[in-house]
Image: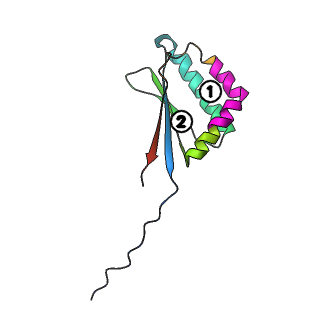
Amino acid sequence: MGSRGSLRTPQRRTAVYRVMRTLRANAGEIPIALQWAADLTAYVNKNYPLSVQFGAEFGSNNIQWHWEIDSLDRLQQLNLKLLKDREYWAFMQKAKGLFVEGTMKDTILSIAD
C-alpha cells in the first residue's frame, strides 16, 4: 500500500474582518471633503492601532475608508474609545456640510481563508 503523505489539518488563522465606511460628499465640497478625510485618517492611524486607508470611488462623490481588525470585540472596543475621544469628535464637527445627510454606509466583511 503506497503512502499518500500525511493529511494535515489546515491551520486556521485568527478571524479577520474588513470594515468599510462610505460617505457621499456634497458635489461642491469634494476637494475639502478629501482633505478632511486625509486629516481624519492620519489622526486615527496615529492614535489607534489601525492601518486605515481611504479613497474616492470612481464615477461618484463617495469617499470610502477601510481597515482590517481581528475581532468584532476589538471593533466594539474601538468604537467605545472613539465615543470618548474629544479630538475625534472635533473632526466630526468639521465635517458638517461636507457630506450628504443619510449616506453613511458601514459594511463589515468576514475575510475567508
- Please state the horizontal and vertical placement of residue 30, each as a whole percent of the image: 50, 17
Residue on which the image places disc 1: 39
Residue on which the image places disc 2: 53
Identify the residue shown where x is 60% and y is 31%. Answer: 41
Is 90 placed left or right of 74 in the picture? right
Amino acid at circle 2: Gln
Q: Which mark is residue 111?
A: none
Amino acid at circle 1: Asp
- Please state the horizontal and vertical placement of residue 86, each as a whole percent of the image: 72, 27
Farthest residue, direction top: 28
User: Is residue 59 or residue 2 the one in the foreground?
Assistant: 2
How crowded pointer 1 is (Cα within 10 Å; few <14, some 14-19, many 20+) is rated as few
- Please state the horizontal and vertical placement of residue 75, each as a whole percent of the image: 58, 41
Identify the residue shown where x is 55% and y is 45%. Answer: 72
Specify whether residue 82 is painted magenta.
yes
* CB within 8 Å, label 2 to label 1: no
Identify the residue shown where x is 38% and y is 75%. Answer: 7
Identify the residue shown where x is 47% and y is 61%. Answer: 12
How crowded pointer 2 is (Cα within 10 Å; few <14, some 14-19, many 20+) is rated as some
Predominant secondary structure in magenta?
helix
Specify whether residue 13 is painted magenta.
no
Image position of 6 with respect to 65: above or below: below
Query: Which residue range is magenta in the image?
Result: 79-93
Q: Check disc 2 and report its element: helix, strand or loop.
A: strand
